[in-house]
Image (cartoon, coloured by chain):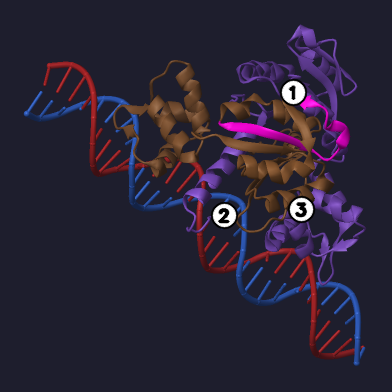
Chain colours: A brown, B purple, C red, D blue
Amino acid sequence: MYLRALTGLAEGGTTTCSSEELAASAGVNSAKLRKDLSYLGSYGTRGVGYDVEYLRYQIAREIGVTQDWPVVIVGIGNLGHALANYSGFRSRGFRVVALLDADPDRHDEVVAGLDVRSFEDLESIVTEDAVAIGVIATPAVAAQSVADRMVAAGITSILNFAPTVLTVPEGVDVRKVDLSIELQILAYHEQRKSGLPTAEVTA
Amino acid sequence: MYLRALTGLAEGGTTTCSSEELAASAGVNSAKLRKDLSYLGSYGTRGVGYDVEYLRYQIAREIGVTQDWPVVIVGIGNLGHALANYSGFRSRGFRVVALLDADPDRHDEVVAGLDVRSFEDLESIVTEDAVAIGVIATPAVAAQSVADRMVAAGITSILNFAPTVLTVPEGVDVRKVDLSIELQILAYHEQRKSGLPTAEVTA
DNA sequence: AGGAGTTTGTGAACGGGAGAACAAAACGGG
DNA sequence: CCCGTTTTGTTCTCCCGTTCACAAACTCCT
């Protein structure tokens, strides 16, 4: 978040910023921001603030975005399609090296300049391109078996868009994004708003 | 999460489950699950467990998924396309009533059985269909102005996929989904794994 | 009917993140 | 060169979510 806020400030021509400004851009409290940055080191100057470019590089280096991360996307349905075309990945150091799908009917398609290939090619792609990160955009029923194959092939980080809990061996990281849960949370608050029109709304 | 886990169990033919089973399905600790459910009421039976269907209905009612929520999606690029076609929304009580885009070239397209309409139609759609929830899938630069228009039109809950912090008046809920930040988190752990091959991996 | 075995619901302890507050450090003006 | 101003880095405190642990409650078997 801070990285993106800094990028925004840099594009706006700002060269120096205070913790207060940066915190506002990132949508957090300034004390929290300073504490977070202090874990990386002491990159600010008291009485002045932070050098935008310098801090940006330090954060990028720390979280590993200075290098390029090859990524494989499995499941080229609507969501996989969108992810393959999502420009935000490339601009943040991620390179989609392959699109895989189990459905042979999709294997002729070209999406985002890449051939959709057979899921059977997973192992060779992972070893060839040293892929460590895999994205699962398949239906829920297929997700666990795809994850198993990924882990067997050597992938150690998985981003899961399927609405299922994945079980993976220790040492493998999984993060889950569930689009409809976010909507459900909004619906819940919405219901409370309309149900209790005079009551206080808890943020 | 519990709701989805329960749906999965119900589809598998389970009629009764213990907190331990349900917690495993949802990927959480069983004590936490019991405490969470206790906030809704006392819907379990000691020595037996929870009735899957009954508990499912109680949770659905509590979070407001028994009713149908009309939703508007603004920004029909790759992501908006995918969201419009995402079946998980409809099956969870959300109905996409309109797709809007500022680009007139897109206004003839039909996506997911809906015409892509002009962003100018926002106000009439919101009032006509009593829409309370809006989804922003536009580029970052447009997100804030879209949010402002949404709020002015009467929308009180926004799901934001654009990589920007939105500022909205009090009483309006915003939730943010950032696809590349999830990847960055994985990349960070990945870097630590390879950088410290003998060190302990912190979950 | 009664006791053994389960499983829920909840009180208590633990841990960690978030904000307030302040000392240390850098800059600028006289 | 010194003092006031600004802003960082850090400590202290508070609060909330998570987990442990156990009593209450229910079932089943004898």
Counting other residues with Cα less than 10 Å from the Cα at mark 3, is it few (<14), some (14-19), or many (20 or more)? Answer: few
Q: Which residue is mark 1?
A: B78
Image: A10 above or below A35? above
Instruction: Name the kind of residue labelled 3 in the image.
Output: Leu
Q: CA distance from mark 2 to mark 3?
A: 31 Å
A111 left or right, relative to B55: left
A69 left or right, relative to A114: left
Q: Which residue is mark 3?
A: B40
B189 left or right, relative to B132: left
Question: What's the chain of the residue with tag 3?
Answer: B
Per the image, label 2 sits on a secondary structure element best described as: loop
Q: Earlier in the sequence, mark 1 or mark 3?
A: 3
Q: Which residue is mark 2?
A: B203
Image: B79 above or below A40? above
Q: What span is in magenta?
A: A93-110
For the point 87% across and 24% down, which residue is it? B112
Q: Is residue B52 visible?
A: yes
